[in-house]
Image (spheres, grey):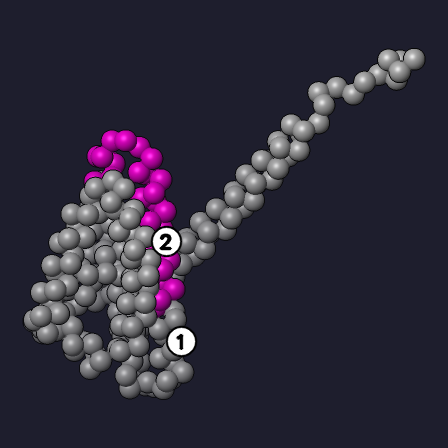
Amino acid sequence: MSSDVSLPLVGLLLGASAASGLRLYATIAVLGFLGRSGALALPPGLQVLTNQWVILVAASLYLVEFLADKIPLVDSTWDLVHTFIRAPAAALLAWAALSTVAEEWRVVAALVCGVVALSAHGLKSSTRAVINTSPEPVTNWAASLAEDGLTAFLLFLAVQYPLAAALAAAAIVVLAAALGTWMWRALRRFRGSRRLHRDGAGLPSSAPSDRALF
């Protein structure tokens, strides 16, 4: 791998990918603003984020997301649509950031960052789907605000503490894998119990006695 790839850059990409899985547009707007203000040295491939129109559009989309994410059921629909946006966008950011790296490592970085974003998105959308089973909106609002705060925290780690950001991204992937495994096993148990119940319902309640035949 090229010597241009340093721990701060790796931490930035992994932390930003985790944040993108929660709030993609806020992540782009914050990175662009920090790069434009000179508070963060973005790699050449991400300098496009500092364009004022990119920042403006990203901030506007985040405002829409902020409002949509506070409305039960609307938030789940938003998450469903963004299943096909957040992870690819994180992969694209990683690909662009490593413009000076060999192609094979750019592909690896894009895949890894895409997985991190998808893991964060999966944890978020699964949690919100469970919360939406409750009719009251307060829990939904609290969860949404917590996600906003977690996004800000992940971006703070990505910029200031890249190693911690990388570890946080790894933890998110592990948690998502554990959740996916648990859901798969729960689904198999549920299907097995349904099959046993269905098969049992087709049997007679009691077998006739041999004495009844004579």
Residue at 32% x, 70% y is 91
Which residue type does callout 1 highlight? Val
**In this picture, is 163 found above or below 135?**
below
* Mark 1–mark 2 distance (CA, rounded to whole Å): 21 Å
What secondary structure is the stretch in magenta mostly built from? Answer: helix
Question: What segment is highlighted magenta in the picture?
Answer: 113-141
Residue 95 % position (x, y): 30, 77
**In this picture, is 81 found above or below 99?**
above
| Residue at image mark 2 | 122
- Pick the quarter of the image with the C terminus: top right
Residue at 21% x, 34% y is 138
- Left or right of 197? Residue 13 is left
Q: Is residue 158 magenta?
A: no
- Pick the quarter of the image with the N terminus: bottom left
Residue at 32% x, 67% y is 88
Q: Earlier in the sequence, mark 1 or mark 2?
A: 1
Numbered circle sitting on residue 27? none
Of 7 and 1, the residue lying toward us: 1
Residue 154 picture quarter = bottom left
The answer to whether residue 194 is seen in the rendering is yes
Residue 46 picture quarter = bottom left
Q: Secondary structure at mark 1?
A: helix
Residue 113 % position (x, y): 34, 68
**Residue occupying the far front of the picture:** 214
Q: Label 1: how many residues lie within 10 Å, few (<14), some (14-19) or many (20+)?
A: some
| Residue at image mark 1 | 108
Of 75 and 147, the residue lying toward us: 75
Of 141 and 203, the residue lying toward us: 203
Q: Is residue 118 magenta?
A: yes
The answer to whether residue 168 is seen in the rendering is no
